[in-house]
Amino acid sequence: MFQYIFKRLLLMIPTLIGAAILIFFVLRLIPGDVCELRLAGSGLYADPEQIKLCRDNLGLNDPILVQFWDFIFGFLTFDMGESMWTGRAITYEIGLRFQLSLQVAVMATLVAIFIAIPLGTISAVKQNTWIDYFVRAFSIAGIAMPSFWLGIIIILGLLISTQAMFGEPWMPPIQYVSPFEDLWANLSQLIWPAVATGYRYSAVATRMTRSALLEVLREDYIRTARAKGLVEKLIINRHALKNSLLPVVTVIGIEFAFLMGGLVVTEQVFNLNGLGKLFVESVLNQDFTLTQALVMVVVTVFVFTNFLVDICYAWLDPRIRYA
Amino acid sequence: MKYAALKYATAFAVGTVMAVGMSATPTKAASDEKPKMGGVLNFVVGSKIPSYDGHVETTFGMVHPIRPFYSLLIRVNPNNPSSPTDFVCDVCEGDVPAGADGGKTFTFKIRKDIKFHDGTPLSAKDVVATFKKIIFPPEGVASSRKAFFKMVESVEATDDYTVEFKLKFASGAFIPAVATPFNFIYSKKDLDEKGYTWHRKNINGTGPFRFVQHQPGSFVEGKKYENYHFKGQPYLDGFKAISAPKMALRLQAIRGDRAAIEFRGFPPKARDDLVKALGDKVTVQESDWNCVLMVTPNQKKKPFDDVRVRKALTLAVDRWGGSKYLSKIAIVKTVGGVVFPQHPLAANKDELVKLAGYGTDIKASRAEARRLLKEAGQEGMSFTLNNRGVDQPYKVVGTWLIDQWKKVGMNVTQQVNPSPVFYDILRKKKNFDVSIDFNCQSVINPIADVTKFLGSAGNNYGQYDDPVLEGIYDKLSRAESVEEQRKYMREYETRALSDQAHLGVTLWWYKINPHRSYVKGWKIAPSHYLNQSLDNIWLDK
């Protein structure tokens, strides 16, 4: 097992280096300039001399190889520098949003797991009954509905229903409060995006659980267990479910990593100050240093999540680690 | 069901009448009310804060949350912000000085009772250090409004509480430039001891609120400054400026009372939705807005080097009709020339209709446009319009223009680009056919603002050289009386918009600010940069 983990860890290094090189050069191909946007973007007069000064100060007039070396050196020494837009340390900018994004991702994953595993299991066990049809319709609706759209509907629903009931419309808070500061305020803001995102996330996982479980339930060893007279509950929980979870774990892992930086629109809908929103802002502002750092954070999260998924594989199916 | 529909319709009608009524006569009753002390104002801001340094930044995303921490030397009168010529002292005392020495010397007396938030007393030295940083920044120090003060020769403190500006030539653009809301007064001690970049990440002002905290991307919090120099103010205990980039969310935030106001402005439909949902719990203030979208033909590209083609572009556009219908769906409304429509230097309707593209007989204008195109051999011409990927009002106005041009046989394709690409095309590649361009200023300062139409201006992208226009501007900038300025302004306008049709002005923006009715004391200004000190706002809760 240790050798297996070590090999997987080594494989992470070339992936991260490749991503760093790619993102640096791809970003420079995008037309636009952070200084132009910052000084002229509001329609006010922008002095060309000031724009040049801004570019000099940000090192944008340096040769591209010098800029590349600065980026790689910073990456290797864990110093990503400062945001070109705000001038604040990138570690500070990202750290500030990481807590919120992580909390939403964890909450949405929990919502998804609590919905997907039981529903997927029931749907497989009760195949072709009205329960199965209902679960399938429920999950297809989840896949079909974008989470941001569901988010908008949730907010409008809350505004309209509370106004009808109490005379004054209510909506979730629009500024983040740490759970350690005020748990109630924190949950009253984050539960809604977690539900909106978790529902879509669960829909994929429910269908995956159902199909994987159906496949396992047709295996010879399940038939043998039934022939031996084992109770159905034990067959499902101990023998079938665990073996059907491999693809489900993959889906959950990939989705979790996606949630850490990919909740772009949902974060806008609920005004969450997370990594997705920061990502969009940094791209729109042509803030190269911040965009590069964010891509690297997301790549690292993906690589690390895949690493954890690989470990889960090895735990769920010992044959994998010996292969 | 019928009853519910009737109820909503009635609420909507009453709300609209109330709202419009209040905006037309900005709340005499409200101004007579005794302000209540206390409360925290939550407001939403649709843009981001690059840094706290007003001398460098240009976005309202910085002005709205940071301006309340600072004072200015003079400012637009907060009780009469709709006037483009009413300025009052902030850290100076008495009236705003009229220029002496033929309009070439301005002497400001500084108040003696002002302290920075760190306890340092404010003196003339601080004001001088501030304006020297803005007007004569040391090499390598950024100052976005240095060019506004080209007429200034020197700024000196003649004693501890007197500041004297000496100008190279008398200019009507000086006082509005001083009142620009970005000219935060910094402490000389901070500049000397902490350097010229310290204010990018730190705040120490003399404004009505003290800085408490800033969570980047989330909110800025301020609390009342007890030693504020306007005694009895501010009325609020504090404020929270909440960052909310999406307009829909800002709207819902006001509806759900997570925020009481948004100071930039909403489109007409959003106003109607809020009024419909909240009735008399929302008040709407409306004003002409000192922003305008323009059409810029690239004169380095054929056939736009031909004045007949450029004239046809402007003649095809029905501005008076657009004002009537486009204003129902977009934040544009007023027909105007090169100057903000409410300013004394602006053209009146009689003067406007003499310009190409401003006639009230659109059929005749379009017939003339067709004739010019035929004469230039450009009947049925095709080109691409470079536009910015922002809904309000860029895409709406762009689509409208294409429809207008189609009516004289032009085939136009709209290329909508994200802001970075849009700017890249406009300012660097310069390879567009015709582009949307814009002019959006804070304090209404026509003599400075109209430089946009000069081919030599840094923010003019038409790529032309017009010495005649430059000559008229030179006379305009040195004209001393309003009558003289007005005369040259008409000459300038006719040359830029009509005779040469270098740029085409579309419709001036229209600012709509619906807010919770318990927000009192704030009056709409013709710019989203103005009247943002928040010292006159109180909450009627």
Image (tube, helix red, strand yellow):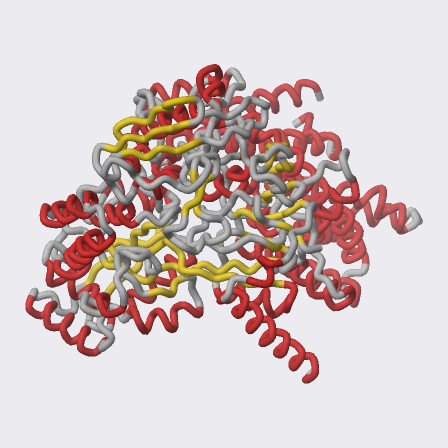
Measured as percent of width and height from the top left, residue B506 is found at 30, 61
Placement of the C terminus of chain B among the 4 image quadrants: bottom right
Seen in the image, is B33 located left or right of residue B489?
Answer: right
Q: Is residue B435 above or below residue A315?
A: below
Query: Residue A82, can we see it?
Result: no
Q: Nearer the viewer, residue A88 or B7?
A: B7
Quadrant of the image occupied by residue B235: top right
Question: Residue at image x 80%, y 56%?
Answer: A122
Seen in the image, is A34 located left or right of residue B499?
Answer: right
Q: Is residue A113 above or below residue B126?
A: below
Q: Is residue B354 above or below residue A322?
A: below
Q: Nearer the viewer, residue A303 or A25?
A: A25
Measured as percent of width and height from the top left, residue A215 is found at 72, 50
Placement of the N terminus of chain B among the 4 image quadrants: bottom right
Measured as percent of width and height from the top left, residue B223 is found at 64, 37
Question: Residue at image x 19%, y 71%?
Answer: B409
Query: Residue B172, can we see it?
Result: yes
Question: Residue at image x 35%, y 33%?
Answer: B107
Measured as percent of width and height from the top left, residue B205 is found at 53, 30
Q: Nearer the viewer, residue B335 or B321?
A: B335
Seen in the image, is A248 located left or right of residue B194?
Answer: right
Residue sitting farthest toward the bottom: B2
Question: Residue at image x 33%, y 21%?
Answer: B138
